[in-house]
Image: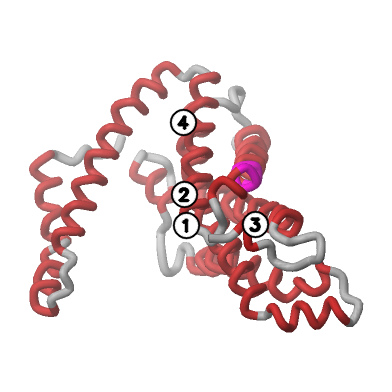
């Protein structure tokens, strides 16, 4: 059983941000107010989450669990749309499909075949594992979209030249697609190579604090890292496919109607 943290101990967390406060005052970084507001907002949100998650975990109704997962995916979709170069109304459906498909497929494989759950809709796994996957899918999808758009825009002359000499659109975009995929998944691959020696990641640490033996915690960490890599890759590939189909004119030029 994980040892609880008292309210008094939580108050002592101020020790972690004293160096930031001192540095901000000395260098006039002007981030103290923003930092405290973010911490306050985080605490309120997390305590509210804990209240309704306790209820959801106790109830553990598959329809409520799936509804909550849907809400998570919708929020993730809006987050991606608001942080990319694409217009919200024009492309939001395709972002939703990319994230939802990779999320549902990865969760199904993870719960059904990796964890071997009798109830693949178990709230703890649907919400907790789903949340970890979505957090990584958000960053991966944003990076993929922005990287692809920036690469195509920056190399538009080269892209058009390749089209004029007979290359099809996919061939002309191959270099940009390669860069955008690598930009998305390289951080995950790099973090995987450092796990265990350089860092003890969240899933493994949580399992150990909850009382699991290190061997079990390691198995879960390996499983979640490969699940994250799979989810990020699938969502990146899907968003690239939709980008290529929807964000170009019939003449294979970038359709400015789709971009901010």
Question: In this picture, is 18 found above or below 153?
Answer: above
Q: CA distance from mark 3 to mark 2?
A: 15 Å
| Crowd rating for badge 1 (residues with CA inside 10 Å; few <14, some 14–19, many 20+) | some
Main secondary structure type of the part rendered in magenta: helix
Q: CA distance from mark 1 to mark 2?
A: 6 Å
Q: CA distance from mark 3 to mark 4?
A: 26 Å
Q: Position of residue 208 (x, y in %)?
A: 38, 46
Q: Which residue is mark 4?
A: 124
CB atoms of marks 3 and 4 within 8 Å: no
CB atoms of marks 4 and 1 within 8 Å: no
User: Looking at the image, is mark 3 or mark 4 earlier in the sequence?
Assistant: 4
Camera-nearest residue between 204 and 133:
133
Compared across the picture, whether 203 is left or right of 239 comes to: left
Q: Residue at x 57, y 52 (%)?
A: 228
> Visible in this render: residue 189?
no
Q: Which residue is mark 3?
A: 236
Q: Which residue is mark 1?
A: 83
Q: Which residue is mark 2?
A: 79
Q: CA distance from mark 4 to mark 1?
A: 29 Å
CB atoms of marks 1 and 2 within 8 Å: yes
Q: Secondary structure at mark 4?
A: helix
Is 110 magenta? The answer is no
CB atoms of marks 1 and 3 within 8 Å: no
Q: Position of residue 195 (x, y in %)?
A: 48, 63
User: Looking at the image, is mark 4 or mark 2 earlier in the sequence?
Assistant: 2
Q: Quadrant of the N terminus?
A: top left
| Residue mark closest to the camera, 3 vs 2 | 2
Q: What stretch of residues is rendered in magenta?
A: 93-98
Q: Can you tell which mark lies on residue 66?
A: none
| Crowd rating for badge 3 (residues with CA inside 10 Å; few <14, some 14–19, many 20+) | many
């Amino acid at each position: 059983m994980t040892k609880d943290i008292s309210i008094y101990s939580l108050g002592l967390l101020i020790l972690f941000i004293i160096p930031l406060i001192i540095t901000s005052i000395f260098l006039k970084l002007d981030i103290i107010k923003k930092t405290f507001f973010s911490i306050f907002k985080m605490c309120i949100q997390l305590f509210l989450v804990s209240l309704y998650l306790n209820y959801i975990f106790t109830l553990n109704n598959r329809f409520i669990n799936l509804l909550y997962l849907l809400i998570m995916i919708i929020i993730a979709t809006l987050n991606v749309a608001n942080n990319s170069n694409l217009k919200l109304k024009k492309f939001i459906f395709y972002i939703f499909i990319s994230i939802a498909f990779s999320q549902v497929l990865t969760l199904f494989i993870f719960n059904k075949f990796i964890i071997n759950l009798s109830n693949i809709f178990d709230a703890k796994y649907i919400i907790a594992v789903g949340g970890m996957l979505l957090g990584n899918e958000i960053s991966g999808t944003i990076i993929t979209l922005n990287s692809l758009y920036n690469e195509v825009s920056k190399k538009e002359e080269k892209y058009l030249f390749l089209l004029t000499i007979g290359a099809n659109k996919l061939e002309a975009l191959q270099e940009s697609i390669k860069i955008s995929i690598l930009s998305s998944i390289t951080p995950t691959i790099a973090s995987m190579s450092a796990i265990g020696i350089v860092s003890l990641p969240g899933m493994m640490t949580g399992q150990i604090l909850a009382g699991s033996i290190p061997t079990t915690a390691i198995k879960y960490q390996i499983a979640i890292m490969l699940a994250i890599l799979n989810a990020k890759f699938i969502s990146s590939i899907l968003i690239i496919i939709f980008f290529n189909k929807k964000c170009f004119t019939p003449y294979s030029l970038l359709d400015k109607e789709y971009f901010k």
